[in-house]
Image (tube, helix red, strand yellow):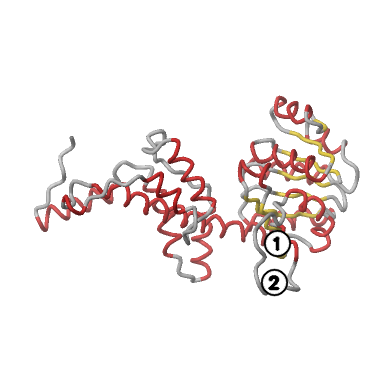
Amino acid sequence: MQLAVVGLGRMGANIARRAMAQGGHRTVVYDKSPDAVAALAREGATGATSLEDLVTKLQAPRTVWVMLPAGPITETTIDALGGLLAKDDVVIDGGNTFWQDDVRRAKTLAPRGIHYVDVGTSGGVWGLERGYCMMIGGDKDVVARLDPLFKALAPGRGDIPATPARENRDPRVEQGYIHTGPVGSGHFVKMIHNGIEYGLMQAYAEGFDILKNANSAALPPAHRFDLDIADIAEVWRRGSVIPSWLLDLTAAALARHPTLDNYSGYVEDSGEGRWTVNAAIDEAVPAEVLTAALYARFRSRREHTFAEKILSAMRAGFGGHKEPTKS
């Protein structure tokens, strides 16, 4: 089938590449960078010079996958496509959009007969090789129509053993993609996925920090251990109960730079963690770990917070505790 991709960053470009390589789909691509368009054109895609040009190069019913950062740029792009596309065409938002924006956009496009599908897309820069895990929200018939595309982009079963007692369930799930329900549900599920990711990453980070400081001068000499953190990460990958792709990435980073001096420790959050915590509040669901992981990212951006200064002042007031002198 034919697919248009708008936004040729690391993931957008690789989605176009994988669609061509794995499914033989014909792609039309557009990006504000002519160089990005030219690079994909050299690989077999059809380049477009504008959204208008992109739409004219597509056969009806058209499918346009928008892969842009969540926020104003995605909003204006989808608004523009709403004025260019026609009945039975499909707009896919594969970025990290807030799910309530999906619901609103679908209602806006519906009077023109334009379908809207939200695809929570996980796979990052490795997706070209590994495939993309996709959480898809939209009308059942529209998602079914696009199935050849999703199947090409998905990882496939690979060598992962089958889960017992999954007979008579949706086989697409075992291929790495799922129709989660109506519009908005795909990005809702991806939002929680990313919130969990925050918690997993924080657990690994704190555990390795404890290992690194096992030789602290504050400990009695007999209680100190000089541990090889890179080797511990590697052995945990092999037969322990805490392996994951995140641990794989950690082991690789530690093997290259055991002290991680090439990283600043400043950690951004892309939004999904905040949205996950807000959803937990709306639903009155306790989410202590995910909330703490989000706050830890906030903490990473400050050398010392005002709250810590308050703590120091109180400790000095009630116990005469002095702050350590800077070396």
- Residue drawn at x 76%, y 54% as measured from the top left: 116
In this orientation, which residue lies closer to the viewer: 106 or 244?
244
Numbered disc 2: secondary structure? loop
- Residue drawn at x 19%, y 50% as measured from the top left: 312
Q: Residue furthest left?
A: 320
x, y percentage for residue 213? 28, 48
x, y percentage for residue 24? 84, 42
In this orientation, which residue lies closer to the viewer: 258 or 313?
258
Q: Residues within 10 Å of mark 1 (few under 14, many from 20)?
A: some
x, y percentage for residue 114? 82, 53
Whole-number angstrom distance, CA of label 1 to CA of label 2: 9 Å
Q: Residues within 10 Å of mark 2 (few under 14, many from 20)?
A: few
In this orientation, which residue lies closer to the viewer: 76 or 201?
201
- Residue drawn at x 69%, y 40% as measured from the top left: 12
Q: Is the residue under label 2 in contact with that under label 1 (CB below 8 Å)?
A: yes
Q: Which residue is mark 2?
A: 166
Residue 33 versus residue 161 in the image, above or below: above
- Residue drawn at x 70%, y 61% as measured from the top left: 174
Numbered disc 1: secondary structure? helix
Q: Is residue 211 left or right of residue 109?
A: left
Residue type at the position of mark 1: Glu
x, y percentage for residue 226? 28, 46
In this orientation, which residue lies closer to the viewer: 149 or 324?
149
Residue 53 location, quadrant: top right
Residue 287 versus residue 90 in the image, above or below: below
Residue type at the position of mark 2: Arg
Q: Which residue is mark 1?
A: 174
